[in-house]
Image: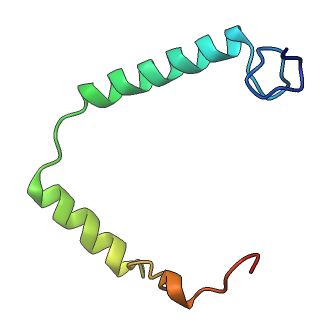
């Protein structure tokens, strides 16, 4: 038997209400429609954006290799 403490219960506090789910779905659909209406990026535009990013000190984020990180829990 499931109760409000079961994570997949519709009454669980972490499960959004149907109205919230509907609003989020509509928000995502509207965003997708706006993105589809944008003109495609031209090569010159992408070159300009990258050069501006680098000029402002932007760079590649380098993360440590996984085997160099400490093991959690043992």
Which residue is most to the left? 43
Quarter of the image for residue 8 reads: top right
Quarter of the image for residue 24 reads: top right
Residue 73 falls left or right of residue 59 = right
Give x and y (percent) for residue 41. 17, 47
Identify whether 55 is placed above or below 1.
below
Give x and y (percent) for residue 67. 52, 86
Give x and y (percent) for residue 9. 78, 18
Identify whether 7 is placed above or below 68.
above
**Quick one: quadrant of the C terminus?**
bottom right
Residue at point 39%, 79% (across, down)? 59
Residue at point 18%, 56% (across, down)? 45
Identify whether 5 is placed above or below 56.
above
Residue at point 74%, 14% (across, down)? 17
**Quick one: quadrant of the N terminus?**
top right
Residue 53 falls left or right of residue 70 = left
Identify whether 66 is placed above or below 38.
below
Give the total number of marks visible in the rendering.
0
Which residue is most to the bottom? 68
Which residue is most to the front? 1
**47 or 31, which is in the foreground?**
31
Residue at point 41%, 77% (across, down)? 58
Residue 47 falls left or right of residue 25 = left
Q: How is the image coloured?
A: rainbow
Residue 34 falls left or right of residue 61 = left
């Amino acid at each position: 038997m499931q109760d409000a403490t079961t994570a997949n219960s519709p009454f669980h506090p972490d499960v959004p209400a149907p109205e919230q789910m509907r609003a989020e779905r509509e928000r995502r659909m509207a965003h997708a429609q706006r993105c589809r209406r944008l003109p495609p990026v031209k090569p010159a535009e992408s070159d300009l954006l990258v050069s501006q990013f680098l000029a402002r000190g932007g760079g590649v984020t380098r993360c440590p290799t996984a085997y160099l990180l400490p093991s959690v829990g043992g």
